[in-house]
Image (cartoon, rainbow, N blue to C red):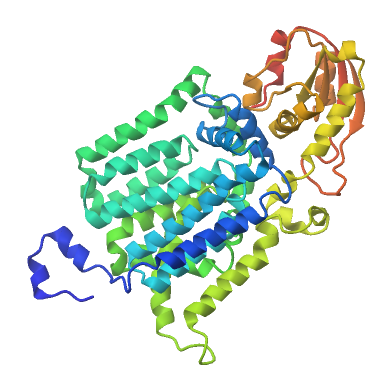
Amino acid sequence: MSTTGETQHLPAARHRALTAPARRGGTPWLGIAIIAVAAFVAEMAVSARYGYVRDELYFLSAGQHLAFGYVDQPPLTPLLARLAAVAGGNTLVALRVVPALALAALVVATAAMSRMLGAGRTGQLLAALAAAVCTEYLGAMHELTTTTPDFVFWAITLLLVMKLLASQDPRWWVAIGACAGVASEAKWNIGFLVAALAAGFLATDARRLLRSRYLLAGGLIAAALAAPDLIWQAAHGWPSIDVFRALQGDAGHNRAVYWVGQVLFTGPVLVPLWVTGAIWSVRSEAARRFRPVGIACVLVIALQFVLGGKAYYSGGAYTFLLAAGCVPAERRLAARRPLGGKIGPAAALAGALLAGALIAAPVTLPVLPARALHTVPVQKINYDLGEEIAWPKLVTLVSREYHARPAALRRQTTILTGNYGEAGAIDRYGPGLGLPQAYSGANNFWLWGPPPAADTAAIAVNLDPAFLHREFRHVRRAATFWNGLGVSDDEQGVPVFVATGLRSSWARAWPAFRDYS
């Protein structure tokens, strides 16, 4: 839309608002809603096809021990797991409602960003569809993990910053600070986005918005919301530092697969769209007003590569980049002739996006029979698929060994596991089989120990036998777990030991079991 002579006399903020790219035809709310609902329905349709992923089992257990912080994450996700379990009768389907709703939220937020960037009705629908079919979002929003709220709060933070830049009203800093503060209670990852946004503001003329008392107010709100977790970490000796050190052990591998991961995790069909969005948002005059956000998204993706972060850590940034890419894409498509004289270019692109999602579906979602994971190498891209199977079978095996012990000895027997997924599975399914609470040295499970002082024996799952021999006088391998599907995952082939004769008290032995990773 061109300006008139009258606009030259308006205040700068008003002038920028009038000279922004036109939004042709308003917002197609019905179409966006249909895409969001379809994304939700697609997730729910396969929500119970396999089972819980190991992190979900951990968060269910953490939800039974609500606290202001945990060894390896802030408290929001365990709280969501607890609420979902209470509201839905502790069922898998109820738990998966939360991430499915999160995917719908990403769809709406991406469409809203594209509208602010100047997309018309077609561009907004394409942006909504791009978020709905993004491989990374489909896979991550299938499970309730820390990534679920993290991606959503990244998208909302970006949207709020865009509102700040569009309106030039510094009062938006209060909402931005509140959003970042709540996000920090979901995952510490939001700190990278905040730092990248600060760099984006400093690199452009938007730096003037940093000189505001509302920014200070927003910062204080964010700090207040983040404080409970920080206080908990300080009170427990900053265990998160040990977790970060363990994660850094994979930094080299993460860098080696990082850029391939960006292609596979978003989906090859979407790569031209978000690459275009990155270039357009940083270089185009039409996107000048929102350039700090474009710089921040590009920077945070590069920053995770430099730091050796996992490929999905910066996934929330793609909501903006996909939205930005749909603005020039819409205009280019409008200038092209229909394919074969019948199919509009935008419809053809939408078809390609849907086709890409269908092709990637066996990797992102549990659409294949679980047994097929033995022969189809989808776990090389989405390892979590294999971590959703056979948990009840593992707990049944542990129950068999536990109940094989004489009643008098059984009352003195605890259950130990090598990782939090196994412990969470026993906590979830064990009560129905007459099993006691599980104990583990893994992350926050260690803080929930040690086992009862009267327990001098243990059924030990997936622990090093040499370690068990140091802590117990007698160690016998009683069984080996096989999932029965031939699927290679972290539990396939793990040993189950019966260990008796605890050499010391649990109070003295328990520190050796700690494994923060």
Image spot of residue 97 (x, y percent): 58, 47
Q: Is residue 1 above or below residue 227?
A: below
Q: Nearer the viewer, residue 331 or 452?
A: 452
Image spot of residue 325 (x, y percent): 43, 67
Picture quadrant where residue 438 is located: top right
Residue at image position (61%, 46%) is 96
Q: Nearer the viewer, residue 68 or 210?
A: 68
Check the picture and name the quadrant holding the N terminus: bottom left
Check the picture and name the quadrant holding the C terminus: top right
Image spot of residue 294 (x, y percent): 37, 58
Instruction: Mark yes or no: residue 25 visible.
Output: yes
Residue at image position (52%, 50%) is 101
Side (left or right) of 471 relative to 101: right
Side (left or right) of 195 relative to 256: left
Image spot of residue 148 (x, y percent): 54, 45
Residue at image position (20%, 76%) is 2
Q: Nearer the viewer, residue 51 or 94?
A: 94
Q: Is residue 333 above or below residue 403?
A: below
Picture quadrant where residue 40 is located: bottom right
Q: Nearer the viewer, residue 108 or 479?
A: 108
Residue at image position (35%, 55%) is 293
Side (left or right) of 299 relative to 73: left
Picture quadrant where residue 184 is located: top left
Of all residues, the one furthest to the bottom in this rendering is 341
Instruction: Mark yes or no: residue 275 visible.
Output: no
